Each structure stands twice: as C-alpha cells, then as structure tokens.
Amino acid sequence: MGLSNNDIFKKLRVAHKLRDTDIIEICALVDFKVSKAELGAIFRAEEHPKYIECGDQFLRNFLNGLVVHLRGPMPKKKEEKK
C-alpha cells in the first residue's frame, strides 16, 4: 500500500517544520483558501469521525504554493523580439 495524500502532506509538514498558519499562508500564495478547521481534519487519525481525505487538488495547490514559498515567484518571461 502506498502513501495517501494525507500521509504525504503530514510528512511535508514535519520536514519543513510548518505550522497551520504557515500552511494557510503558503496556500494563499496560489490563491487557495484553507481554514484551520480543514487542516485539523486532514491531520487527524483515519479512525477519527471528523477525518477528511486530502484531495489531489488540495495537495497540488499546497505543493505549488510551497514552490513559490521556497523559490519565490516565477520570473516574468521577456518578450521575444522579431
């Protein structure tokens, strides 16, 4: 059995020493809004009644925000002269 999106998200959180507020700010970098309650539900144990699965879109937006957070925004491309 492979890792679930929740497992990947938890491991990234620990590896980068991120708090809930950090994750919210990182998601905001790519215009993705998330609440502390949603994060709490994602980081709960699978057996917990309020556990929710981390969807692909959620993880993708977080990863895109993490790239911007770590590297900075993409530089604008220069227009080609003809």
Image (tube, rainbow, N blue to C red):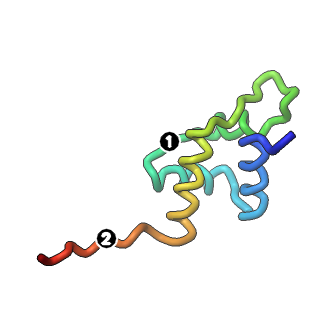
| SS at badge 2 | loop
Q: Position of residue 10 (x, y in %)?
A: 77, 49
User: On screen, 52 above or below 59?
Assistant: above
Which quarter of the picture shows residue 26?
bottom right
Which quarter of the picture shows residue 78?
bottom left
Front label number (2 vs 1): 2
Q: Position of residue 74 (x, y in %)?
A: 41, 68
Q: Position of residue 59 (x, y in %)?
A: 62, 45
Residue type of the residue flagged with mark 2: Lys
Q: Point out the residue furthest to the left here.
A: 82
Residue type of the residue flagged with mark 1: Lys
Q: CA distance from mark 2 to mark 1?
A: 25 Å
Which quarter of the rendering shows the C terminus? bottom left
**Residue plotted at (58% across, 60% down):** 66
**Residue plotted at (66% across, 35% down):** 37
Q: Residues within 10 Å of mark 1 (few under 14, many from 20)?
A: few
User: On screen, 68 above or below 56?
Assistant: below
**Label 2 belongs to which residue?**
76
Q: Point out the residue furthest to the front here.
A: 82
| SS at badge 1 | loop
23 lies left or right of 43: left
**Label 1 belongs to which residue?**
33
